[in-house]
Image (tube, grey):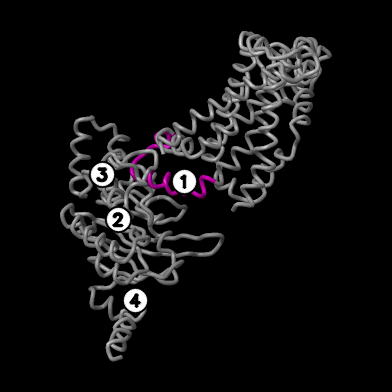
Amino acid sequence: MKPFFELKGGELAYRAKTVFRDLGFSLEQGKTLAILGKSGCGKTSLLKLIAGLNAGKGQILLENADVSNFPPQKRGIVYLYQEALLFPHLNVFENVAFGLRIRKTPENILQEKTRAMLEALGLQDQAQKSADQLSGGQKQRVAFGRALIVAPKLLLLDEPFGNLDVETRAAMQDFYKEMAHKSGISAILVTHDLKEAIRMGDAWAYLEDGNLELFPDLQDFMSDPRTGMQEEIRFWKKFNQI
Amino acid sequence: MRAALAFFILFGVLPLGAGLVYAFLYATGFIGLLNTGFTLQNWYNALISRSLWQSISLSLGISLLVSALAFFAAVYSWYYSRLLLEKRIPQALLRAPLAVPPIVASFVSYQWWSNSGVFARIFQQLGWIQRNADFPELVNDAAYFGVVVTLFYLSFPFVLLYLIDQARRMQLGAYLELAATLGASEGQIRRKLLFPMLFYRMLPTLVLYAVFLFGAYEAPQVLGRQSPAMISVLIHEKLSRYNLSDIPLAYAYALVYAGILMLLLGVFWRWNEKTD
């Protein structure tokens, strides 16, 4: 059986320096692949390659179709940044409805879908507010809603909760898991936060020096010294002994 | 903080206030060589003066047109060549026109666009016109083409440099990428995001810039017409005439002009505060 998503021969160079070469991996439908890696290892570049937002090469197969030469608009892949990037001239409702408006969805369906999404996000009372009247967590919820309402085939998450405080980040990670479970979201998450990778992922990989290593399960992922899990365990053991 | 406030009042508010009071006293007949005492005649004459209202309308129209042209040109330039514009050399080239004084730009414009200018000669050499005089009037013309082109030349680099900085601060590139992955076409990105986002972001500065253009003097003086003249040219012409009895009227003109600007700015800031 063919995988839901597959990247073959991913390659990117920046200013004559190779970021990664011959990189490949696949993803099952409805799963979230968490890619852990240090800052500057090429995580964002990898996501942008998949989204069609940089000049990288590689074959991208999504639902058995080769989308490698499709522009970003036609891939059915939504990229979510670290910042929520809510459109400042639109209110919450219009931000969430953005994808439907540009698809010229009939007004009654747009209203219905957007209200349902706002309810799912727990933001039904915030619909008329502007982006700067929301908290960091609420902004990220709106960003998720805006992405999910267009039913993307694949969601790319570039450290989406990196700007949030620890408590809000944990709440948002739980929120994501719940939404992912309910909506059957297929996603690739890149992060340098080990806990985020563990909490949000269903499959795990580590990106270093242009090489991506996929782990068969969480246990293997956590056992790899590069993830920092063992170090973390040692730290807390030592801390508990004090 | 107090020292800064005192400095601002002493060197900012006080001279301006004194100037306005002086102009008011002059226009109202309290001071001035030929004035004989309190009168509202100058105010009446100013308010019913056709040339004043024509000049104000013309100045307002030109300032809005040039600001809008510079904004649209800057947005399109940024959109289609943003990677290039982030580089050092293009940015240095963009800064170069900022060092050109308006009077120099005006004379250069005259040399390019007048009947005896470079374009007229090129057209004649190409055989498109028989004589220099057949070249359309593009300076000192009724449509104010020469003034608009020159003010645009002076404004565009400033607006573009400001836009580049704002776009970087607001991560505009990331917004556009995000919109593309959400399915927005190039046209939708421009219409629904690029223009409105930059417009709201830059509006306060664009309004101030339009106010600056409203009072432009050198380009309208060299390339404009005597009638209707842009407001600064009209007031200067009245003030510098040999007819001393025109001076109070010139001050009344200046105060009406200043009052209209203050009113427009006041309305704008109030609207801006509300929408913020």
Q: Which residue is mark 4?
A: A227
Q: Position of residue A75 (x, y in %)?
A: 33, 46
Q: Position of residue B208 (x, y in %)?
A: 58, 34
Q: CA distance from mark 2 to mark 3?
A: 13 Å
Callout 3 secondary element = helix
On the same chain, marks 4 and 3? The answer is yes
Q: Work out whether residue A59 can be spotted.
A: yes
**The disc labelled 2 sits on which kind of residue?**
Gly
Callout 2 touching callout 3 (CB < 8 Å): no
Callout 1 secondary element = helix
Q: Position of residue A176 (x, y in %)?
A: 23, 58
Q: Which residue is mark 2?
A: A137
Q: CA distance from mark 3 to mark 1?
A: 25 Å
Answer few, some or many: residues within 10 Å of disc 2's Cα (few below 14, many 20 plus, some between 14 and 19).
Answer: some
Q: Residue furthest right?
A: B242
Q: Which chain letter matches label 2?
A: A
Q: Which residue is mark 3?
A: A126
**The disc labelled 1 sits on which kind of residue?**
Leu
Of residues A187 and B200, which is closer to you in this image? B200
Q: Nearer the viewer, mark 4 or mark 1?
A: 1
